[in-house]
Image (cartoon, helix red, strand yellow):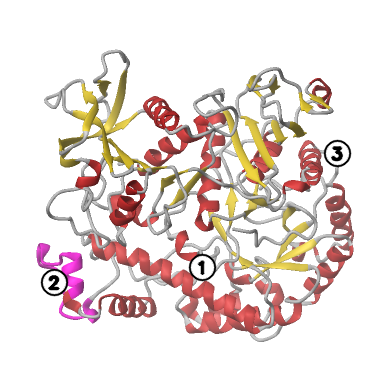
Amino acid sequence: MASKVPSPKGFLYGGDYNPEQWLDRPDILAEDIRLMKQAGINTVSLGIFSWSTLEPEDGVYDFGFLEERINTLYENGIYTILATPSGSRPKWLADKYPEVLRVDDRGVRQHYGFRHNHCMTSPALRKKIYAIDRKLSETFGNHPGVISWHINNEMSGPCYCPLCQDAFRDFLKRKYGDIKNVNHAWSTTFWSHTYRSFEEIEAPSSIGETQLHGLNLDWMRFVTERHKDFTAHEIQAVRDGGSNLPVTMNLMYNYTGLDYQEFSDLMDYMSWDNYPTWHKGSEVAVGFDSAFEHDRIRSIQRAPYLMMESCPSSTNWQSVSKLKAPGILEAQQIQAIAHGSEGALYFQIRQSRGASEKFHGAVIDHYGGEDTRVFREVAKTGHALESIREVLGSTVHSPVAVIYDTQNRWALEDAQGPRNAGLYYREAVEKSYLAFKKYGLNVDLIDETQSLDQYQVIAVPMAYMFRQGFEKKLRDFVANGGRLILSYWSGIVDDTDLCFLGGTPHGFIDVCGFRSKEIDGLYEDEIHSASSVDSREERHYNFHNLAELLELEGAEALYTYDQDWYQGQAAVTRHAYEKGVVFGLAADFDQDFYDDFYEKILKEISCKPILGQAGSFVLPTGVEVSERTQEDGSIYIFLINWNREAVEIPVDSDCEILYASGDSSLMGQFQGEAGVKGTDSLGDKYLLHSYECLILKK
C-alpha cells in the first residue's frame, strides 16, 4: 500500500513541542527555532496538551499563540502535525460538567487530575471536543504549514459510569438481539448467572461479576468500540471544519487495553510511541523486542507508518531512568525507518521546566545549549535521514507472517487454565518472529481478521480462539500451497469463549492431521525435552510451561517427548494437505528449537533471505536485517548491530553503501565505483561496529 504519511521535506524528523509552556520567554521560543534547524528538524507535533490554553474558559477561544508558532515554524521550513487536545481536558470542564470524569469499576467517580481521566460516552465532553476540534480545523486545517492531524493521545482506559453501562447494554443488544443469545454465548447457566433482560447486565468489576469470560470479552470489545467511536467523532469534527488532511493516532507498546486493529479503517496511517528499556538487559533482546513492535504497528495496515514518539535520552517514568549509550539514539531512529516508518520523532523538543515530565529526556535540555552529547546525536541522526531521503516512499514486503491477535490474547489470558501462572502468549509469538528474523526475513504480525494470501509461511502460536471463520482461512492457505506452523492450545473456543465440541483444533483436524487430547501444565522448575525420530539428529530440545498430547490422524511425528508418562508421544508433527503442509508444535519449546526448525522449513521451500541465497543462514547473532523496496525496483537493506562488540557480516557484491553510521574512514575500503567489492556470491565482509547502522542499496 502506498504511503499516506505526509512527507513535504523528506522523512519526518522532530517531535512533540509545547510552546505554550514558554509564552513568557520569547527568547527561548526564538532559540528553539534556531536549534531545531541546526538539528535537521523539519516537523513538530503541536497542541497535544493545549486545551486549557486554547480554551481558557468555556466557549472562549484563544488560538493566538498557536497561529504565531505555526506561522513562524513554517517560515523556517518546519511543518506542524496538529493535535486535537482531547488527551487532557481543562479544570473548568470537569467542574462545569462532572459527567466528563470517569467512574471506576467500584462506582467511584474520579477527581480531576492526570490525563485521559474522562468518559468517552459523555455528551458534554463530546459536544465540547467537537466544538474546539472544528474550530481548530476551520482555522488551521488548510494552512500550508500543517500537514496532518494527530487525534487524541495514547488513548486508554474504561469508564463504568451509568452512561457507559447503558451504552454497553446497547452494544450487546446490537450484537445479540435477544437476551437468550447472550445467555447461550456466555454460558450463564454456570453458577446460575442467567440474565432475564439486557437491563440486568453490568460491566465486569472487582466488586461484581468477573467469571463470565464471554462478558469480559465483550466488555473489552465495547471499550475498544467506545474509543473508536470517540475517535470517529473527533475526525468528523475535523472534516466538518473543512480539512481533509490525513489523520493518525499514536498507539502504545504492547498495550492490550484496546484492539488496535479495529482502528485501521479510521486512520490514514498508523503511528506509535517507542520507549525501549535500553541497557536493562541485553541490547540484542531490547532491539529485537522494539523491532517486533515496529512490525506489529506496520502490519495493522501493512503500509508505511510513523514513529510518533521516542526518547532522545532517558525517560522519567520507567523504574530506572537509564541513559542511552552513544550510538543507541541513532540506531533506534534508523530502526524505525528500516521497518517502514516514514519518520522518527521524539518526545520532547524542549524539556519541560516543571511538573510530571520535567526530567524526561528532550532534544533541548534545561541547559539549553547545542554542545550536549544528546543534541549532537540528534543532529547527526537528522542529517543521516536527509542523506537517505531516496528511501522515502519505499515499502516493506514480507514473505512470512506470525499471527498476533489481541482479542485472542484477551480470551487466552482470562481463560483460567491450563496454566494460571502464565501462558506467555506474547513470548510465544516472539519466538516465531525471532526465528524468522534470524533467518534474515521481513516479518508481518497480523491478526485473525487479515488476509493470509500473500505469504509463503505463516506461524500461528496459541490461537486459542478461532474467530470469524479463521479455520477456513487457514485451510485455504494450506490448500493453496502455504506452509503453516500451528502451535499447542489452538482452536479451542469460539469468539465468545465457548469451547468447541467434537475435537480440536476446531474444523481443522483433517488439515493438521492430529487431534488434541489433553494439555499438561508444567511447574516453573520443570524442564522437559523432545528429540527427533531421525536417529541422525542427536540433539534434544527443551520445553517449558505446556505440553499438548496429540492423537495422530494422518500426521507423522518428527519429534517425540523424552520423558514423563507421555514419553514417546508426538511433540512435533508434519502433515501434507492438498498443495501445502501443516507443522504442529505441541510444546512450548525454547528459542533454539524455533531457530533450527524454522530454518529447515524455509530452506525446504527455498525462501530467500534478505542477504545471501536461498538456504543460506548468514546473520550473526544480534544483527538485525530489514528491507524496503522502492517502486522503481531499488532495494534498500538495513543492518543494525545490537551487540556490544563488532561483528563481521557478508555483503552481496551488487550492493553499494548508502549510509553507514560508524567511523566514516571505513567507507573507502568497501565502496568502489561499482559498489561494494567482492569475489564470491556473498561479497566481502563488512565489520559492523557496536550499535552501527549500515544501509545498502541494490
Q: Residue 677's x, y, as percent?
A: 76, 22
Q: Determine crowd level at label 2: few under 14, some 14-19, many 20+ residues with C-alpha closer than 10 A.
A: some
Q: Which residues are magenta?
A: 181-200
Q: Residue at x 41, y 37 (%)?
A: 432
Left or right, residue 660 beside residue 253: right
Q: Residue at x 27, y 49 (%)?
A: 464
Q: Secondary structure at mark 1?
A: loop
- Which amino acid does the dot numbered 2 rest on? Thr
Q: Determine crowd level at label 1: few under 14, some 14-19, many 20+ residues with C-alpha closer than 10 A.
A: few
- Which amino acid does the dot numbered 1 rest on? Asp
C-alpha span from label 3 to label 2: 68 Å
Which comes before the other along the chain, label 1 or label 2?
2
- Which amino acid does the dot numbered 3 rest on? Asp
Q: Quadrant of the C terminus?
A: top right
Q: Residue 387's x, y, as percent?
A: 81, 43
Q: Which residue is mark 3?
A: 371
Closest to the observer: 71 or 270? 270
Q: Secondary structure at mark 3?
A: loop
Q: Quadrant of the N terminus?
A: bottom right
